[in-house]
């Protein structure tokens, strides 16, 4: 079954605006990761947040993790047209080392 | 540069033929590799885990005889789609096991292989 569920499914914003997407999961995890996928391409790792961390930053990305609510958010600040892509959260469960369960993804379109 | 190399990036084949997809770990020795499948506009679904020197572990619902996985060396894992049919058309992506300690840490995916079965 899907471990991660994301919302919104699609997001359309203008350059310069912030984009926020959320991910919820169901079981205990070691970490949660966010990936970007451009159309027809492989996945690019964006950021990993471990279960004992609450917030992490990387450039224009900010990720939060609330293990009590089993949810995470990804914020992209000052978005650019090049940020147009699908974004997936993925969780590594505590009972299955190495395996990642992916969410359905959020398709983000940034218009100039 | 890429740390996981996947080949071919695109393949078109006739129904009934077999297609082999290679996944190479370029900068470290991988005793396991993970294979995913992604249908259009959908998420990635884990198909199987290849294990160097032993049998692959398949996820529930994935046909072992249909998707042959071999991990012949510490740098190469292959996925062979046997007797391919149009419904096997998909995007197949491999992933390395990670180099972290307590957990997998940052992970690297291949660029993916788009299979189209006519």
Image: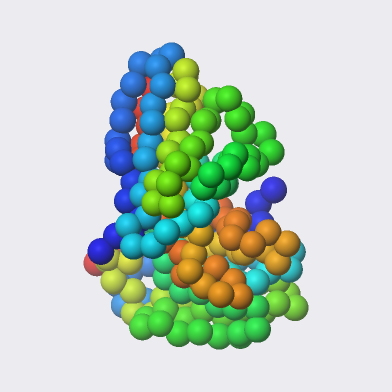
In x, y percent, where is residue B1? 25, 64
Marks counted in the figure total 0
Q: Is residue B82 left or right of residue A3?
A: left
In x, y percent, where is residue B32? 52, 52
**Image quadrant assignment for residue B58:** top right
From the viewer's side, name the closer residue of B67 and A101.
B67
From the viewer's side, name the closer residue of A62 and B81.
B81
Instruction: Examine the rendered structure and indicate whether residue A105 appears above or below residue B50.
Output: below
**Residue in view at x 32 percent, y 57 percent:** B26
**Residue in view at x 65 percent, y 84 percent:** A52
Instruction: Examine the rendered structure and indicate whether residue A1 appears above or below residue B118.
Output: below
Q: Is residue B108 left or right of residue A73?
A: left
Quarter of the rendering occupied by the C terminus of chain B: top left
- Is residue B90 among what the camera can see? yes
Instruction: Examine the rendered structure and indicate whether residue B81 appears above or below residue B37.
Output: above
In x, y percent, where is residue A90? 56, 62
Colour scheme employed for the rendering of this structure:
rainbow
**Image quadrant assignment for residue A61:** bottom left
Q: Is residue B39 left or right of residue A26?
A: left
**Residue in view at x 45 percent, y 41 percent:** B72
From the viewer's side, name the closer residue of B102 and B89.
B102
In x, y percent, where is residue A11? 45, 61
**Residue in view at x 39 percent, y 62 percent:** B28
- Is residue B42 among what the camera can see? no
Q: Is residue B72 left or right of residue B104?
A: left
């Amino acid at each position: 079954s899907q471990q991660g569920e994301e919302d919104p499914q699609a997001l359309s914003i203008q350059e310069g605006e912030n984009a926020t997407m959320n991910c919820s999961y169901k079981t205990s995890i070691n970490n949660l990761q966010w990936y970007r996928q451009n159309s027809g391409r492989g996945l690019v790792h964006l950021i990993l947040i471990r279960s004992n961390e609450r917030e992490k930053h990387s450039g224009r990305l900010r990720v939060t993790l609330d293990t009590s609510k089993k949810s995470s958010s990804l914020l992209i600040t000052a978005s650019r047209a090049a940020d147009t892509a699908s974004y997936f959260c993925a969780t590594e469960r505590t009972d299955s080392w190495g395996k990642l369960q992916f969410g359905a993804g959020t398709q983000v379109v940034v218009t100039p | 540069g890429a740390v996981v190399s996947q080949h071919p990036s695109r393949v078109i084949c006739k129904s009934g033929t077999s297609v082999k997809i290679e996944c190479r770990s370029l900068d470290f020795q991988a005793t396991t590799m993970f294979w995913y499948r992604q249908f259009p506009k959908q998420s990635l679904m884990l198909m199987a885990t290849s294990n160097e020197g032993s049998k692959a572990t398949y996820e529930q619902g994935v046909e072992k005889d249909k998707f042959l996985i071999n991990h012949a060396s510490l740098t190469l894992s292959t996925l062979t789609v046997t007797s391919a049919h149009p419904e096997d058309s998909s995007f197949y992506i491999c992933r390395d096991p990670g180099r972290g300690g307590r957990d997998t840490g940052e992970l690297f995916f291949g660029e993916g292989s788009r299979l189209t079965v006519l």
